[in-house]
Amino acid sequence: MSAEQSPKIVIVDESPIRAAILEEGLREAGFTQVVHISEMQSLLARIYAVDPDIILIDLENPSRDVLEAMFQVSRAVRRPIAMFVDQSDSASIQASVEAGVSAYIVDGLKKERIKPILDLCVSRFNAFAKLQEELERTKSQLEDRKVIERAKGILMRVKGLTEDEAYVLLRSTAMREKKKIGEIAQSIITASEMLK
Amino acid sequence: MTATLRIGFIPLVDAAALIVAVDKGFAAAEGLDVELVREVSWSNVRDKLNIGLFDAAHLLAPVAIASSLGLGHVKVPIAAPFNLGINGNAITVSPALHAALMEQIDGDRFDPMATAKALAKVVAIRRKAGAEPLTFGMTFPFSTHNYQLRFWMAAAGVDPDEDVRLVVLPPPYMVDSLKNGHVDAFCVGAPWNSIAVDLGIGHILHFVSDILVRAAEKVLAVRQTWADKNPDVVAALVRAAVKAAEFIEHPENRTEAAQILAQPERIGVDAEVIQRTLTGRLKISPDGTFRESGRYLLVGREGAGRPDPTQAAWLYAQMVRWGQTALTPDGVKTAMAVFRPDLYDAALGNRAPEQAPAAFGAFAGPVFDPDNIRGHLEAFEVGRWKT
């Protein structure tokens, strides 16, 4: 940060991973005063205590309504301005909303100062979304593999097949039924449990 | 005509006409391919509607007006061509507050003036004892819940900004907050009041229809500019909603409607609890006391679907009364212009509208006159309006 002091930023997010990604990005960009609040119960008390210049919150957080109410009645917040102040910049608003980040500027910071912070949050939120997606995919692949192994075992035992033959049977059935191998494997496991 | 729409909603029973319109195929029959998106906060619904991520939304009627006036957020003119519900909220209190009120009450426990006077006494007793002020939960600063609570308690001289605390809570957190003592009472839509009663931690003190016989609750909201560009789509959407509302109001369809609404991706609670709201027969106490009202929630019947600009003026008057905005002739005009009976009539081929009652049937104060909001507000002792 140059002459101006780094603004105090609060991140309100129940996801510790996303908050960490965001916090790291902000620190790398030179914003030294970053606080993460994950506890929703005492949200207002904590925000009053920190007295931030900017609040960044996940759009899907139900507590957004609570924060908005605070801006309307609060004596502690000096000049509350919600996000999307500048309606002319609709592209950046859209990007923020699509990424899932909402910002509440509580102290009348100039638009030039909030813009880089928002841009950074958008890219970090997007990075998090990608990470999440990859994680989900890997997880379901792993799940699939476990299920296929179990189904192969059942086929080998019940039908006296070799491991390769069991797999070929699973695969050809999946192709014929236009389903995923994982689904066929799961139905074999379910059926064998019911027949026990 | 085929139009693809994204519509946001909050999981509440008063989204019924919208959800049934889509899930029962009334929207498809009008050539609309609708994706319903379940949301968690009113801020989110409003923002996504305002910037164009949603084409339409299930919205608190006062939020539609606030958005058009530029209150609390940016100014985006909203048009409401269909009223999704009249009434539908209830005030639920903790067992402790219920006992305190019943100890002080002089008169019928379902008479809001009697309960408001009892509340005034409880507030005075607590103050004398040096206890913390009572805390009431509601859903949003621009919400009927906020105005209904204030209207009720102020009638007996309780100042909602000085004598008690009013806090915003997301509806799904209401029950927990009552349970752990963060609030002593709340005003919210269905199903949350019933859930508190079923858990044995709350008593439904009032249906809000005790306070105002007829109050616009949620609207189907679209951006004004979008409505101007897509009149046919708006009309089709209104027709689908009208048909859905008619379906829901048929007593023999209530079970099916409740089942549609109960789906996990819709409201996601027990169909039986939803059905109580639709039929207006609610369990009000953990001991199993039921109370029935034909006015608990009006979805379409008694002309509920047709937006009534007088209702918008009343909501604007509440914003003025509680200091959320100043009273101006332009403000009244802008607020009233949000509710669009003309779009509703056009969609239905201008069939003669049912005469909707103009009066709100408030339990206190003079009859509301949109042409004399100042005079109306002057009749109330408690308020913080400014000009």
Image (spheres, rainbow, N blue to C red):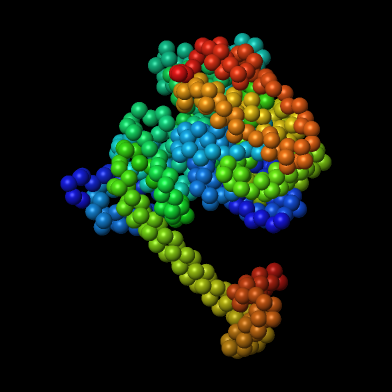
Instruction: Please tell me which residue is depicted at 26% across the width and 44% down the height of the picture.
Output: A7
Residue A89 lies, with reference to residue B353, above or below; the image says below
Residue A179 lies, with reference to residue A116, above or below; the image says below
Instruction: Please tell me which residue is depicted at 73% across the width and 42% down the height of the picture.
Output: B347
Image quadrant in which the C terminus of chain B is located: top left
Q: Nearer the viewer, residue B354 or B208?
A: B354
Residue A179, image x and y in percent? 65, 75
Describe residue B306's horizontal placement relative to residue A55 as left or right: right
Q: Nearer the viewer, residue B307 or A23?
A: B307
When asked about the image quadrant of residue B292, the answer is top right
Describe residue A129's horizontal placement relative to residue B222 as left or right: left
Q: Tell me, yes or no, if residue B177 can be seen here.
A: no
Residue B108 lies, with reference to residue B283, above or below; the image says above
- Outermost residue on the left side: it is A3
Describe residue B189's horizontal placement relative to residue A132 as left or right: right
Q: Tell me, yes or no, if residue B340 can be seen here.
A: yes
Image quadrant in which the N terminus of chain B is located: bottom right
Instruction: Please tell me which residue is depicted at 66% across the width and 46% down the height of the picture.
Output: B231
When asked about the image quadrant of residue B344, the answer is top right
Q: Nearer the viewer, residue B367 or B283?
A: B367
Residue A164, image x and y in percent? 58, 88
- Outermost residue on the right side: it is B252
Residue A21, image x and y in percent? 34, 58
Describe residue B352's horizontal placement relative to residue A28 as left or right: right
Residue A2, image x and y in percent? 18, 50
Instruction: Please tell me which residue is depicted at 32% across the width and 38% down the height of the picture.
Output: A108
